[in-house]
């Protein structure tokens, strides 16, 4: 159960839950004296300004990048949360709904297939996390008799659901099970196109394929084509809407609780739906939402106390968008502390990134790099005054969290964060040198630096700080071994980001971009380079899933967080840089998830 009071900055912040989220401390992250007279110009650069920045001038001229202001500002401070309703909701979930749903899940007369369908429904409604141990125990036993379960099963939806559930819980169900749906010509039977529910389920399951599983690629192509050709007259409205929603963004390219919010509305319209499960799903969504609002209040007050946004006007003021990313990593109520840690640390690192990328001169980037490698507040006076704010914020934030975790009996949980931050700054320096010199490296050299600079492995480290799902020493050893599962999200992010931001980066003179590097090295068009990078992105999703199934060094709950990080990339970078320039779609997601409870 998560706790509640934190004391980042100058004031004690409001309750999130019973107990203390952060112990009281007199430590102020940013003394007011550092924030005086350091305001930087927020004037949007003109096109003429940008065009004047030739490569030879960049060494001594600051980069010019404009980011729009926050769309949310302090909005969530004014969103009311009734503590009495919050506690009553928690009590109803724990004392009433969980026992009822467990009885449904564990009914002895249910067949194994019925149980697997029930588990899939719980996953879709985002309430499976309440029964993890029961589900894992059941699936372990069921997987041992998988051959008997599937031997005579010819229902596409059932097979696809079983495939999806087993793989999500770490069991490598063979993709050969889908061979039974092919004709003599080796292609999927056209008659399957009439089974819309089965096709939709196969489409979702196809996103869990592994390298060399060509049949899953075929399944994705086949289902996308036929589902995309479906008209509203060919099926019931509720199912047609589900199809359109999935085709725009597949389940495993989206936040689990966001998927559930939409699925609850679909399930509510299903004939014969289970009213108990539906009610539990609605209560859970609203309970999660109240958690998120409480956490956003804490984070907003912390950010305001820090005072960087008004003083460093070149940065991306994105605390709400950053918090949404943390929700994507772990939406479950019990991970309040993790969401707050991940948000505040990632926001400071984002400021460092913006500083190196969008404001600092190269000598200043070098100074900041050297200071971070020493990790000593005593070196702060050697930095330009505006950088001292950033440097002190990072070091003292880590110190506050470290003290909190030690008070909870967790030692050494911050070391991966410190190590990753130092490594991240090295990468920022390398990319700054490329940008300032107008250098276009080889694609391989670029990806070696560019992929790691994505920082999603570092983001995972922030989230792992407070997780109790794994022994700390075991977790640190696994993380320090640089497992492949942590590299895949970095690759996915870099490849996607460089495709959707290509024109924008080139217009700013940032020629070290994956698309441009590939074009120059191989002498191909932009369209050809994009096609190659898109294919690489798809292969890395497969590698990620393979490593999820193969990795046994840490518990599944740790590995799921890495999968969840990768699920976020399409949400932010489908058609552009949604973090730097949030579009209406992202704003709508934030609004529906954080501001509108589901009516009971």
Image: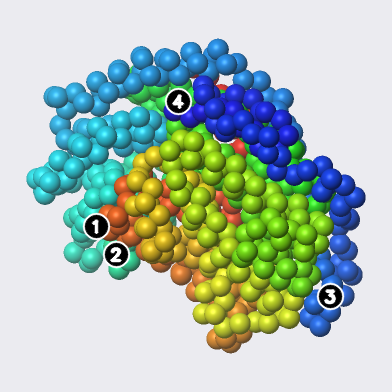
In the rendered image, the vertical position of residue 177 relative to residue 297, given as above or below: below
- Decide: few, some or many residues near mark 4? Use Cα within 10 Å; few <14, some 14-19, many ≥20: many
Q: State which tag comes first along the sequence, 1 or 4.
A: 1
Near-viewer residue (471 or 191): 471
Count the marks: 4
- Residue marked by disc 1: 175
Instruction: Reply above or below: 121 against 206.
Output: above
SS at circle 3: loop
Q: Nearer the viewer, residue 418 or 277?
A: 418
387 on left or right of 199? right
What residue is disc 4 on?
A: 284
Q: Earlier in the sequence, mark 2 or mark 3?
A: 3
Apparent side of residue 124 relative to residue 361 in the rendered image (left or right): left
The percent coordinates of residue 516 (x first, y second) are: 63, 77
Q: Which of marks 1 and 3 is in front?
A: 3
Upstream in sequence: badge 1 or badge 3: 3
Residue 253 image point, x, y percent:
47, 50
Depth check: 50 or 479 in front? 479
CA distance for labels 1 and 4: 33 Å
- Mark 2 to mark 3: distance in Å? 51 Å
Write the residue at 20% across / 37% down.
137
Q: Residue furthest front?
A: 378
Closer to the chain start, of discs 1 and 2, is 1
Q: Where is residue 548 in the image (x, y as percent from the top left)?
A: 33, 55
Residue labelled with disc 3: 60
| Crowd class of label 3 (few under 14; some 14 to 19; many from 20; radius 10 Å) | few
Q: Is mark 2 on a helix, strand or loop?
A: loop
Which quarter of the image is occupied by the N terminus?
A: top left
Residue 19 visible from this viewpoint: yes
Residue contact at pointers 3 and 4, CB within 8 angstroms = no
CA separation, marks 3 and 4? 54 Å
């Amino acid at each position: 159960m998560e706790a509640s009071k934190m004391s980042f900055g100058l004031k004690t912040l409001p309750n999130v839950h019973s107990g203390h989220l952060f112990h009281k401390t007199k430590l102020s992250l940013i003394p007011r004296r550092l924030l005086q007279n350091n305001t930087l110009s927020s004037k949007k650069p003109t096109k003429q300004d940008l065009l004047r920045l030739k490569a030879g001038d960049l060494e001594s001229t600051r980069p010019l990048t404009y980011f729009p202001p926050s769309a949310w500002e302090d909005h969530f401070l004014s969103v009311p949360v009734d503590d009495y309703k919050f506690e009553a909701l928690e009590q109803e979930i724990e004392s009433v709904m969980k026992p009822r749903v467990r009885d449904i899940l564990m009914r002895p007369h249910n067949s194994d297939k019925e149980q697997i369908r029930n588990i899939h429904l719980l996953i879709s409604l985002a309430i499976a996390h309440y029964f993890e141990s029961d589900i894992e125990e059941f699936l372990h036993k069921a997987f041992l008799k998988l051959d008997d379960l599937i031997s005579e099963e010819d229902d596409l939806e059932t097979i696809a659901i079983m495939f999806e559930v087993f793989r999500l819980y770490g069991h490598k169900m063979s993709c050969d099970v889908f061979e039974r749906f092919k004709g003599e010509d080796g292609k999927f039977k056209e008659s399957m196109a009439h089974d819309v529910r089965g096709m939709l389920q196969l489409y979702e399951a196809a996103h869990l394929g592994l390298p060399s599983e060509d049949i899953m690629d075929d399944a994705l192509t086949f289902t996308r084509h036929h589902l995309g050709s479906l008209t509203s007259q060919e099926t019931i409205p509720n199912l047609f809407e589900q199809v359109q929603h999935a085709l725009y963004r597949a389940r495993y390219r989206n936040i689990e609780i966001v998927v559930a919010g939409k699925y609850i509305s679909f399930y509510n319209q299903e004939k014969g739906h289970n009213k108990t499960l539906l009610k539990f799903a609605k209560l859970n969504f609203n309970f999660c939402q109240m958690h998120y609002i409480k956490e956003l209040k804490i984070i907003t007050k912390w950010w305001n106390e820090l005072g960087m946004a008004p003083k460093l006007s070149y940065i991306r003021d994105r605390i709400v968008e950053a918090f949404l990313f943390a929700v994507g990593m772990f939406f479950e109520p019990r991970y309040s502390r993790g969401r707050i840690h991940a948000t505040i640390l990632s926001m400071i690192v984002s400021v460092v990134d913006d500083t190196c990328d969008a404001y600092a001169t190269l000598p200043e980037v070098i100074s900041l790099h050297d200071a971070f490698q020493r990790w000593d507040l005593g070196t702060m006076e050697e930095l330009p005054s505006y950088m001292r704010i950033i440097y002190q914020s990072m070091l003292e934030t880590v110190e506050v969290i470290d003290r909190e975790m030690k008070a909870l009996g967790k030692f050494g949980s911050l070391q991966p964060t410190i190590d990753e931050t130092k490594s991240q700054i090295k990468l920022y320096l390398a990319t700054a040198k490329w940008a300032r010199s107008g250098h276009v490296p080889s694609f391989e050299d670029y990806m070696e630096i560019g992929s790691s600079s994505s920082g999603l492995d570092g983001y995972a480290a922030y989230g792992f700080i407070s997780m109790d799902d794994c022994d700390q020493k075991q977790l640190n050893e696994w993380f320090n071994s640089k497992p492949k599962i942590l590299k895949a999200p970095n690759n996915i992010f870099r490849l996607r980001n460089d495709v959707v931001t290509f024109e924008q980066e080139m217009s700013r003179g940032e020629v070290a971009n994956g698309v441009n590097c590939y074009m120059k090295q191989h002498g191909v068009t932009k369209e050809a380079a994009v096609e190659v990078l898109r294919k690489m992105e798809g292969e890395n999703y497969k590698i990620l899933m393979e490593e999820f199934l193969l990795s046994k060094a840490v518990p599944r709950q740790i590995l799921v967080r890495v999968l969840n990080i990768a699920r976020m990339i399409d949400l932010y970078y489908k058609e552009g840089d949604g973090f730097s320039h949030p579009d209406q779609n992202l704003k709508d997601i934030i609004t529906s998830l954080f501001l509108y409870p589901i009516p009971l």
